[in-house]
Amino acid sequence: MKQYDAIVIGSGQAGSPLAKKLANAGKKTLLVEKRFIGGTCVNDGCTPTKTMVASARLAYLGQRCNDMGVKIKGYTVNMPQVKKHKDGIVLKSRNGGQEAIEKTKNLDLIFGEAVFIDNKTIDVNPKKGKNMQFKADLIFINTGCKPYIPDNIEGLDGIEYLTSTSIMELDKAPEHLLVIGGNYIGLEFGQMFARFGSKITILERSGHILPREDNDIALEVTRILEQEKIKIHTGASLSKVKQKVGGKITAYFTVGDQEKKIKCSHILLAVGRTPQTVSLGLDKTGVATDDKGYIKVNNKLETNVKGIYALGDVKGGPAFTHISYNDYTIVYRNLIEKKNLSIKDRPVPYCMFTDPELGRIGITETEAKKQGLNIKVAKLPMAHVARAIETGDTRGVMKAVVDADTKQILGVAIVGSEGGEIMSVLQMAMMGKITYEQIRYCVFAHPTFSESLNNLFMAIED
């Protein structure tokens, strides 16, 4: 049994920086990682997917170059090269993170799976050697989530389906990829592989894709995807799959009262994620979880057991890398710098990296109406944005929801080129209590995408 001041389980975007900062603050710290340094973001999420999205965008631009006077006779997509490029960037980031951890004094790193054996003690089954036990008064859980596999689809266990992790290991684009789930992950992969040459069909159970977004924003994204010959079925529920040995997969689904079927070469399950808590042995600690297995925390990210914290996706709530990283900063500053910070009411921006991307912050028009707020809505098609016209990509729309009384910005959705960057400008305005009227008459550099915020708020009649 070895005693530490702090144990961090999982090296995601909260775990790694927290472990280093605790060690640098003088606490003898242990970091336990069962797989790779960097967590989902570096290994299975942001880094590899956005690298592949960039390759897919180049393929898209290759199709459109002739429209803008650049003549290209043709292009081909080399999937092994796409994968090699992605793998190289992931490996560089992963190895860099591990090297930084190994150089940190006061910090030990062990690769293996951690299981609680009592309140503040873990047993680690390492990749090499015998099991070891470690104890600490402070324990931080950053084990993240993994793809959710539904158990109500007949025949699913009889086919080799893809997840958001395994699909990135393909060295050949599927002939026909059926994507189950029309949310952020499913849409990014759907468009990506359409550009790599796959036929794409998407099934979404809700009435429109992106069910958390306003209907008009979802419809705008739908139009963009359908322009790339992506077939989308909404209100669709997959019930059964069958596959003959070496043959195509037949998927059976319902849309309303109609039963339909479709043949495809591959199926991607993109119906959500589930927390990695089952194997932690939390029953030995008394740490409470909800009915889905997410660890319950208070506004300072501490569980119901004093000294045990949960950070990142494993605690539920917004499942974004930047939220996980912010969790780390809050916990560290509270514990070491004796601050009194809370996760309550923090801004939660996010982007979906389809092309063009969707940048979101604050509440939607639908949410504002449910709250009974006195609102006004500003919309501006990207076709009216000078920079979009000049760069040859006018797909998308800007939308902002504002408080009619205070003139404060309540929420923003930007579908368009640099959508995330434009959204970030408005996020800072929201944080600084800058009104839409001030932005309406603000002097922005010309010609930029953000300059169009003048015109967006000109659309509001006072």
Image (cartoon, rainbow, N blue to C red):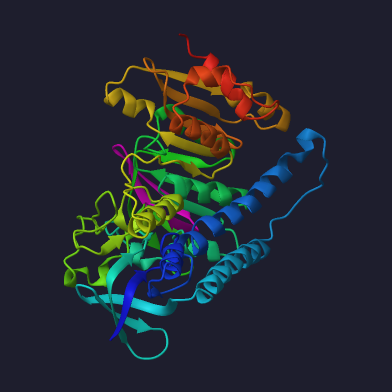
- How many circles with numbers are drawn on the protein? 0
Q: Residue at x 38, y 71 (%)?
A: 27
Q: Residue at x 70, y 25 (%)?
A: 446
Q: Along the line of sight, which residue is nearer the eye, 253 or 86?
A: 86
Could one spot residue 307 in this view of the protein? yes
Q: Is residue 265 magenta?
A: yes
Q: Along the line of sight, which residue is nearer the eye, 340 or 446?
A: 340
Percent of width and height locating residue 237: 33, 46
Q: Is residue 230 left or right of residue 394?
A: left
Q: Along the line of sight, which residue is nearer the eye, 302 or 200?
A: 302
Percent of width and height locating residue 16: 45, 66
Q: Quadrant of residue 276?
A: bottom left
Q: Is residue 398 above or below residue 149?
A: above
Percent of width and height locating residue 247: 48, 64
Q: Is residue 437 left or right of residue 374?
A: right
Percent of width and height locating residue 185: 46, 50
Give the prevailing secondary structure in the magenta stretch.
strand
Q: Is residue 210 above or below residue 35?
A: above
Q: Is residue 39 above or below residue 185?
A: below
Image quadrant holding the C terminus, namely: top left
Q: Residue furthest top?
A: 462
Q: Residue at x 23, y 59 (%)?
A: 303
Could one spot residue 226 in this view of the protein? no
Q: Which residues make up the magenta segment?
A: 252-271
